[in-house]
Amino acid sequence: MNNFASVSQESCIACGACNSAAPEIFDLDDNGIAEVIYGGDSNRGITAIAKELLEELQEAIESCPTNCIQLSAVPFA
Ligand code: SF4
């Protein structure tokens, strides 16, 4: 199951769509750039997203215009 997520921030255009779709998983920093906040992850991609939130996560991924949300079955670090 792909339940580790991280934002490739260099490709993020600060549109906020991910935060709208999955506010428990994504937030925007002071510059509007998205990061994974779930479980205090700080965009490291090491916190497994709970099963109940995977639908929201998928919506966020589909809503991202630059495809910069990465998913993995294993932690990113
Ligand atoms: S949807 Fe994509 S481009 Fe928009 S803020 Fe989120 S990560 Fe950035």
Image: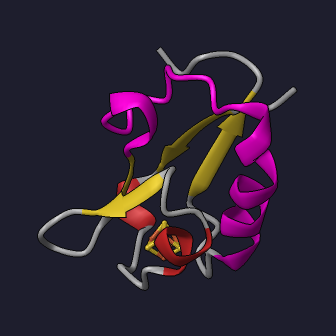
Q: How is the image coloured?
A: secondary structure
Q: Which residues are magenta?
A: 37-63
| Residue 39: in magenta span | yes
Q: Relative to the observer, which residue lies in front, 22 or 4? A: 22
Q: Is 4 on the left-hand or right-hand side of 52?
A: left
The residue located at (20%, 63%) in the rendering is 29
Above or below: residue 62 compared with residue 58? below
The residue located at (62%, 46%) in the rendering is 70
Q: Is 14 on the left-hand or right-hand side of 18?
A: left
Q: Relative to the observer, which residue lies in front, 46 or 56? A: 56
Visible in this render: residue 41? no
Q: Within the image, what quadrant is residue 61 found in? A: bottom right
The residue located at (37%, 44%) in the rendering is 37
Visible in this render: residue 67? yes
The image position of residue 56, as x and y in percent, is 72, 59
Q: Relative to the observer, which residue lies in front, 55 or 70? A: 55
| Outermost residue toward the right in this view | 1
The image position of residue 8, as x and y in percent, is 45, 52
Q: Relative to the observer, which residue lies in front, 38 or 5? A: 38
The residue located at (81%, 55%) in the rendering is 55
